[in-house]
Image (cartoon, rainbow, N blue to C red):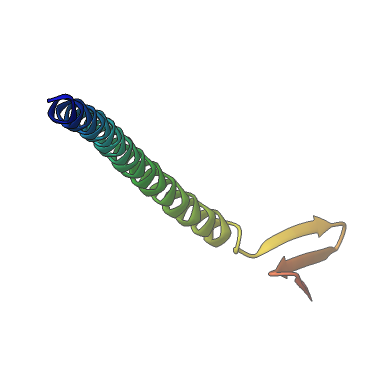
C-alpha cells in the first residue's frame, strides 16, 4: 500500500513538473512572438524612413543638377576696353 502511495506521489510530482515546463515553454513562445512582432514593426518603420531618405536624396540630386545647369552659362566681365569671358573654367578673351 505504501508503495502504491509512493508511486502516486511520484506521478503527481512528474505531472506537476511537466505542467510547469509546459507553462514556461508557453511563456517563452509568447515572448518570442512579441519580439518577432516588435522587430517586424521596427523593420517596417526603418524601411519607411529609408524610402523617405531616398526621396529626399533624389530631390536634392535634381536640385543640384538644376543649379549646375543654371550656373553653366557664359559669364563676362568688362574691364576698360577688354572683355573677359569664361565658361566652365575655360577663359576666353573677347
Q: Position of residue 42 (x, y in %)?
A: 36, 38
Tell me if residue 91 can be seen. yes
Q: Is residue 12 left or right of residue 77?
A: left
- For the residue pair 11 and 33, the one nearer the viewer reads as 11
Q: Quadrant of the C terminus?
A: bottom right
- For the residue pair 82 and 43, the one nearer the viewer reads as 43
Residue located 49% across and 56% down the image: 61
Q: Quadrant of the N terminus?
A: top left
Q: Is residue 60 left or right of residue 80?
A: left
Q: Is residue 12 left or right of residue 63?
A: left
Tell me if residue 93 can be seen. no
Q: Quadrant of residue 33?
A: top left
Residue located 26% across and 31% down the image: 17
Q: Quadrant of residue 6?
A: top left
Q: Position of residue 14 (x, y in %)?
A: 22, 33
Q: Quadrant of residue 88?
A: bottom right
* Picture layout, residue 76 above or below residue 23: below
* Picture layout, residue 48 above or below residue 18: below
Which residue of the protein is positioned furthest toward the right in this rendering?
80
Q: Position of residue 9 (x, y in %)?
A: 20, 25
- For the residue pair 37 and 18, the one nearer the viewer reads as 18
Amino acid at each position: 500500500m505504501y508503495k502504491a502511495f509512493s508511486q502516486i506521489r511520484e506521478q503527481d510530482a512528474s505531472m506537476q513538473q511537466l505542467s510547469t515546463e509546459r507553462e514556461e515553454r508557453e511563456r517563452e513562445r509568447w515572448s518570442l512572438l512579441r519580439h518577432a512582432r516588435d522587430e517586424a514593426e521596427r523593420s517596417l518603420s526603418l524601411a519607411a524612413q529609408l524610402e523617405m531618405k531616398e526621396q529626399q536624396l533624389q530631390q536634392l540630386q535634381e536640385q543640384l543638377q538644376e543649379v549646375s545647369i543654371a550656373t553653366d552659362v557664359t559669364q563676362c566681365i568688362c574691364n576698360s576696353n577688354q572683355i573677359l569671358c569664361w565658361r566652365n573654367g575655360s577663359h576666353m578673351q573677347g
